[in-house]
Image: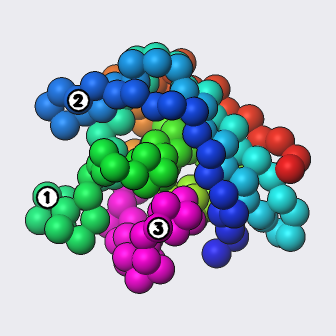
Amino acid sequence: MAITVKSVNYSQIMTSKENGIYTLMNPANIIVTYTKKDKTYKLVLSLYRGFRTDGASIPSAFTWFLPKWDSKNMKYNCGAIVHDCLYTLKGLGIFSREEADDFIRGIWRCSGISRFKAGMADKCLEIFGGGKDHWGSDDLDNNKKKLIKAEIKNA
């Protein structure tokens, strides 16, 4: 575990849903405070209106264990959004795929998901998740990269 998430903050995130895809109706920010190699940083994501995500890519057979989207827990959804952004942007050229997976696990822990569930999801990502097909891909459209501004700041 190279990344340890300490906290997650976000602005009001309003989405519309169509065919299992959530589209941002307003600009939104997600700030994740994390440590890496004993230093603390902030990942600041600014998402523009129109950004789209499918939430967590949980196979339907397992949504009893973890949902794709939780309308009552936006921090949970932030985990999926941050993960999507990091995969789309190939970890900003800073984070490995494994570290991108560390973010979703850590954010889910901050959202109240148990260590067991977050750890199981992380292991499933490691074994089954994405691979080269999703790393650096605009899965939902060719515009996604233009709808994400990401920066790393010292905390």
Marks 1 and 2 in Cβ contact (< 8 Å)? no
Q: Which numbered circle lies on residue 17?
A: 2
Q: Residues within 10 Å of mark 1 (few under 14, many from 20)?
A: few
Mark 3: which secondary structure? loop
The answer to which quarter of the image holds residue 129 is bottom left
In front of the other: 143 or 64: 64
In front of the other: 95 or 26: 26
Q: Is residue 136 visible?
A: no
The answer to which quarter of the image holds residue 6 is bottom right
Label 2 sits on what residue type?
Lys
Q: Is residue 109 above or below residue 48?
A: below
Which callout, 3 or 2, points at the residue further toward the start of the chain? 2
Residue highlighted by disc 3? 112
At a point 78% along the width and 64% down the height, the residue shown is 36
Task: Give the magenta part as a residue range.
Answer: 105-132
Q: Main secondary structure of the magenta part?
A: helix
Q: Is residue 121 magenta?
A: yes
Q: Which numbered circle lies on residue 60?
A: 1
Comparing labels 1 and 2, the label whose residue is closer to the camera: 2
Comparing labels 1 and 3, the label whose residue is closer to the camera: 3
Residue 58 place in picture, x, y as percent: 26, 58
